[in-house]
Image: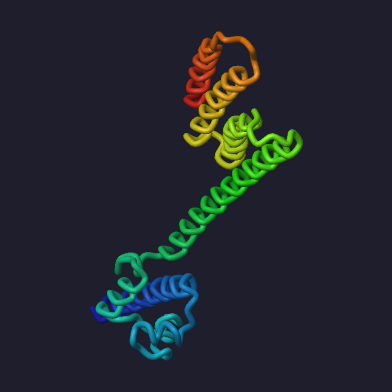
Amino acid sequence: MKMIAQNVVLEYLLAMAELNEIVAENLIELRKKKHLTQIELAEEIGYSDKSISKWELAKSIPSVDILKQFADFYGVTVDFLITEGSAKKKIVGDKKYEHIGHKITIMALLTCVIWLIVVAIYVNGIVADNQPTNKFWVTFIWGAPATFLVLSALSWFYWRKNISLTIFASLFIWATITAFFIHYLVYSNDTEPLWYIYLIGIPIQVALILISNLK
């Protein structure tokens, strides 16, 4: 019986030591994510930096009420704090969303560049013709398909098959047809609208949808 009791106690101590390590690792990762020092964290939660250091070194584990305080401060649950690898997984997930944000920012910047070029072409056309009213406003019409073409290319480069690629590619198709239609109306002497060119977009759109559904 004495041997059994000793084994039970040993197993309990090992389990507690392991739990201490898990909590310590999660607390360290969460603190670093908030860019706080132990002293700054101590001031935030109302405990000494020595206590913070002791918990992060796995010398002891915070009581349940303190774990709840940590959980509330970091916006997680107590179960999150006592689960191995939770904080690292959360940080990886946050970085993933950061990467998506960076990609969207790049797409937005390139869109701005395209429209800056469009405006420059428009202004240059007005200055060259020295006429405030001319047909150079059609330049803005072609800016739309140019934008959707670049966004489609970036969507394919970043995500390959993705709903955003299908959307941008579809917008590129119809914006191109519309730009050609308006350009024709403005610069052609033909009084008959070229409305039937929109029929070209239907099979292209259907093919695009079918391609996007391929595994």
Identity of the residue drawn at 65% across and 19% down = 187
Q: How many marks?
A: 0
Determine the residue positioned at 58% across, 45% down. 107
Of residues 147 and 124, which is closer to you in this image?
124
Q: Position of residue 138 (x, y in %)?
A: 62, 29
Which quadrant of the figure has residue 63? Answer: bottom left
66 over 111 or under it: above or below? below
Q: Position of residue 2 (x, y in %)?
A: 26, 81
Taking depth in this image into account, of 178 and 97 the one nearest to the observer is: 178
Q: Is residue 43 left or right of residue 188?
A: left
Q: Where does residue 15 sit, x and y in percent of width and height?
A: 35, 73
Question: Residue, x 30% and y 76% (percent of image)?
Answer: 67
Describe residue 37's horizontal placement relative to residue 79 as left or right. Answer: right
Q: Residue furthest right?
A: 128
Which quarter of the image is occupied by the N terminus? Answer: bottom left
Q: Residue 4 falls in which quadrant of the image?
A: bottom left
Depth check: give the residue in front, 3 or 121.
121
Left or right position of 134 against 128: left
**Residue at image coords 44%, 84%:** 40
The correct choice, above or below, for 75 with respect to 105 in the image is below
Whether 62 is drawn above or below 164: the answer is: below
